Image: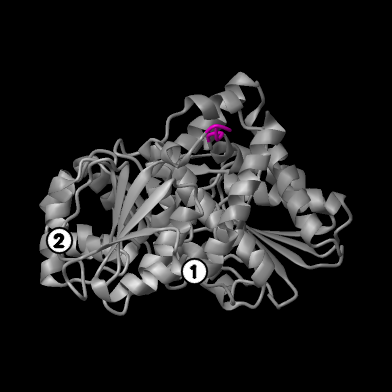
């Protein structure tokens, strides 16, 4: 699913109006019907008190249209407040004012100067239609006062399309006190980029998409560098396995992981790789971890480092299809030197994670020396160490895109909506996963999954997209069976076979 910058959304609306064809006021009515359906489904009691706050633009027109439609459906405790300080309404907003006047079930008030706020209790539903996605500066004056009043109330707040005051992409210079804090955002047709950033969760709340029939042709034709990856996008990526396959068919890979006290990271990554279809896995470990890894993961072959406690010597990559390095590695001086040697002497794609990324943050020039097709898997803190401190998720995403383009690597920026960034700057936001995965070792599991897919010959982009999705899917299966609170990284590994099986079944059903 595409994610358009806000200016593209206006182009999509215009395209739909021209090509369908449909009048803009009728497209607004279609949106209002979808919004009304969503509200009445959630709050079916027709005595529920609703207060609609409308601005002078089309977002306000949406709110007024919904108030009228809810009255037609029998709701009786409806109040609409339209703020029009400049005395100018958009044409479609004015039309909905005219349509609302005379509807006795809606108490309608137009505010041009002084405003006496309505009472808002915990029983009220506030529908925010003050401003839509076209906002480009922080709210101020009377509108900021209204936002603060709504936020201070105990009412449940529903935002139309986007919470008023929140900008669709970059909120670096916004005023957080002047943004509606919605419990639910009903986004029209497509999500906004801002929805995928952690710091915006207090404003967006839970979000849902409402299909209003915007032109599919227009969506296909309009370009964007952002999109989500859904089930239907990922399932076709999985290749069938030949009946006559053998372990050599599914590749050979090397995992360099662990140090004294960190054998668990090696085990988690190794088990994840072995549960993701790899043919043969070698694990390079310091001597102190050899017995632990061999006991816990008997399917893997261990290679023992000269050092008793850490990674200190690079390994040959001849005959390998992929190398992963980083989980539990530590940041010893000899490990730092060995990492640089490993990069310089590896010809196959690498998955670089955890301490390997932290070590590279002081050798940033080495990022450009990584083998073609390599993947970096940083969490936000590791990414900040690579690219410099970032004040918010939007800045971090932009810097990550720049790094992917400069170093010609794929970046998996981990988070609630893990962002996969290709070397051409295109970005996919993953839609699987949950908060139960916010636990130590979850990233090690992802490293193992990615390593296995690269070893099997998947191109890097496909491996990254498929791996991130399946990793999150395993987390979702674990959450259903165990609950999010009780999950561990080991839970993800246990559910990986079920996740792969689900995708295989999806393929069979669609073929």
Q: Position of residue 98 (x, y in %)?
A: 72, 43
Left/right placement of residue 303 relative to residue 299 reads: left
Q: Position of residue 352 (x, y in %)?
A: 28, 55
Residue at image coords 56%, 77%: 152
Residue carrying label 2: 313
- Name the image quarter holding the C terminus: top right
Disc tally is: 2
Between 320 and 437, the one nearer to me in the picture = 320
- The stretch of residues the image draws in magenta is 239-244
Vertical comparison of 427 with 20: above or below: below
| Furthest residue in direction right, as rendered | 74
How packed mark 1 is, by other alpha carbons closer than 10 Å (few <14, some 14-19, many 20 or more), is many
Image quadrant where residue 339 sits: bottom left
Classify mark 1: helix, strand or loop: helix
How packed mark 2 is, by other alpha carbons closer than 10 Å (few <14, some 14-19, many 20 or more), is some
The span from disc 1 to disc 2 (Cα, nearest Å) is 28 Å
Between 318 and 359, the one nearer to me in the picture = 318
Question: Can residue 184 be seen in the rendering of this structure?
Answer: no
Say if the magenta span includes residue 59.
no
Q: Position of residue 125 (x, y in %)?
A: 71, 67
Residue carrying label 1: 489
Left/right placement of residue 296 relative to residue 188 reads: left
Residue at image coords 54%, 40%: 234
Q: Earlier in the sequence, mark 1 or mark 2?
A: 2
């Amino acid at each position: 699913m595409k994610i358009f910058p806000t200016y593209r959304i206006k182009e999509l609306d215009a395209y739909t109006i021209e090509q369908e064809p449909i009048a803009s006021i009728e497209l607004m009515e279609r949106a209002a019907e979808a919004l009304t359906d969503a509200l009445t489904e959630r709050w079916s009691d027709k005595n529920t008190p609703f207060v609609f706050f409308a601005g002078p633009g089309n977002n306000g027109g949406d709110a007024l249209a919904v108030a009228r439609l809810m009255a037609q459906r029998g709701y009786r405790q409806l109040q609409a407040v339209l703020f029009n300080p400049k005395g100018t309404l958009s044409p479609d907003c004015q039309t909905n004012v005219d349509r609302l006047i005379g509807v006795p079930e809606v108490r309608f008030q137009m505010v041009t100067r002084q405003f006496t706020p309505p009472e808002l209790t915990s029983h009220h539903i506030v529908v925010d239609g003050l401003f839509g996605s076209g906002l480009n500066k922080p709210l101020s004056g009377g509108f900021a006062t209204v936002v603060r009043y709504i936020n201070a109330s105990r009412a449940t707040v529903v935002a139309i399309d986007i919470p008023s005051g929140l900008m669709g992409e970059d909120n670096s210079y916004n005023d957080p006190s002047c943004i509606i804090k919605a419990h639910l955002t009903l986004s029209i047709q497509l999500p906004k980029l801002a929805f995928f950033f952690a710091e915006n969760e207090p404003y967006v709340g839970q979000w849902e998409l409402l299909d209003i029939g915007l032109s599919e042709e227009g969506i296909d034709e309009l370009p964007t560098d952002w999109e989500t990856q859904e089930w239907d996008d990922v399932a076709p990526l999985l290749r069938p396995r030949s009946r006559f396959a053998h372990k050599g068919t599914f590749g050979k890979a090397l995992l360099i992981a662990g140090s004294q006290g960190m054998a668990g990271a090696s085990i988690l990554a190794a088990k994840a790789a072995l549960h993701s279809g790899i043919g043969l896995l070698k694990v390079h470990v310091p001597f102190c971890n050899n017995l632990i890894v061999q006991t816990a993961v008997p399917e893997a072959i261990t290679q023992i480092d000269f050092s008793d406690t850490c990674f200190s010597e690079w390994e040959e990559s001849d005959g390998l299809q992929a190398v992963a390095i980083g989980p539990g590695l530590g940041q010893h001086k000899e490990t730092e030197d060995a990492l640089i040697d490993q990069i310089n002497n590896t010809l196959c794609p690498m998955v670089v994670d955890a301490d390997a990324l932290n070590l590279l943050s002081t050798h940033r020039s080495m990022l450009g020396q990584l083998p073609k097709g390599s993947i970096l898997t940083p969490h936000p803190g590791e990414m900040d160490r690579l690219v410099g401190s970032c004040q918010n998720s939007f800045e971090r995403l932009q810097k990550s895109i720049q790094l992917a383009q400069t170093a010609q690597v794929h970046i998996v920026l981990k988070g609630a909506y893990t962002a996969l960034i290709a070397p051409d700057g295109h970005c996919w936001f993953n839609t699987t996963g949950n908060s139960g995965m916010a636990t130590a070792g979850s990233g090690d599991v992802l490293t193992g999954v990615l390593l296995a897919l690269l070893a099997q010959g998947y191109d890097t982009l496909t491996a990254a997209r498929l791996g991130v999705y399946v990793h999150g899917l395993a987390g979702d299966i674990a959450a259903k069976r165990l609950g999010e609170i009780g999950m561990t990284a080991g839970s993800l590994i246990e559910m990986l076979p079920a996740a792969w099986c689900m995708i295989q079944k999806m393929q069979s059903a669609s073929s």
